[in-house]
Amino acid sequence: MKEHARRRGRWAFGLTVTAAVWSVAIVVGAFLWPAYSVQAVGPAGRAVSSTQTLVQVNGFWVLVPVLIPASLTAIVWLLLHRRCSRGDRVAGAGVWTVIAVLWGFAAITGFSIGDLVLPSSVLLTVAAGLTPLAPAPA
């Protein structure tokens, strides 16, 4: 049974790391991914096209909503670690609360970045279900 718990813990850790990497990739993508495309007629009637990133079009304030999934993922990671290493049941309840907030964020922002948040939500939900509860200290 102990080996089974270790295996589940490894899977939970891997899924949590993947969710964290994905959440950080969203932030990096706000700077690098060409989210907007503009086509215009330039001098001499030539078609001119250009692309701009989310940050270029909306400014740095757009990082506030983009950083929310990464922040929530980091909180879930810390709470899962506390639950797994110390057997903290309060941390376990906190995990599910923060995951619910992340799902809510994905739903509310569904027409903008919500679709990008869904993979992290799914990964963290599965990771939370797999995370073993350490025995409580005596």
Image (cartoon, grey):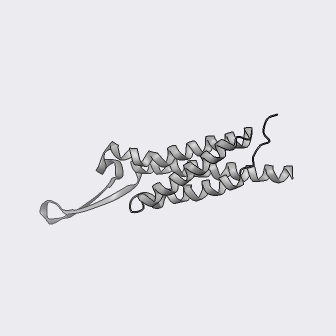
Residue that protrudes farthest toward the top in the picture: 138
Q: Classify residue 24 as left or right of residue 14.
A: left
Percent of width and height locating residue 132:
75, 49
Residue at x 35%, y 52% (from the top left corner): 53
Q: Is residue 29 visible?
A: yes
Percent of width and height locating residue 128:
66, 52
Please identify the quarter of the rendering in which residue 46 is found.
Answer: bottom left
- Using the image as rendered, state which of residue 97 and residue 85 is in the foreground: 97
- In this view, 79 is above or below 52: above
Percent of width and height locating residue 35:
36, 57
Q: How many marks?
A: 0
Residue at x 34%, y 48% (from the top left corner): 55
- Using the image as rendered, state which of residue 104 and residue 77 is in the foreground: 104
Q: Which corner quadrant holds the C terminus? A: top right
Residue at x 55%, y 47% (from the top left corner): 73
Residue that protrudes farthest toward the left in the picture: 44
Q: Is residue 17 visible?
A: no
- In this view, 19 is above or below 37: above
Percent of width and height locating residue 58:
30, 49
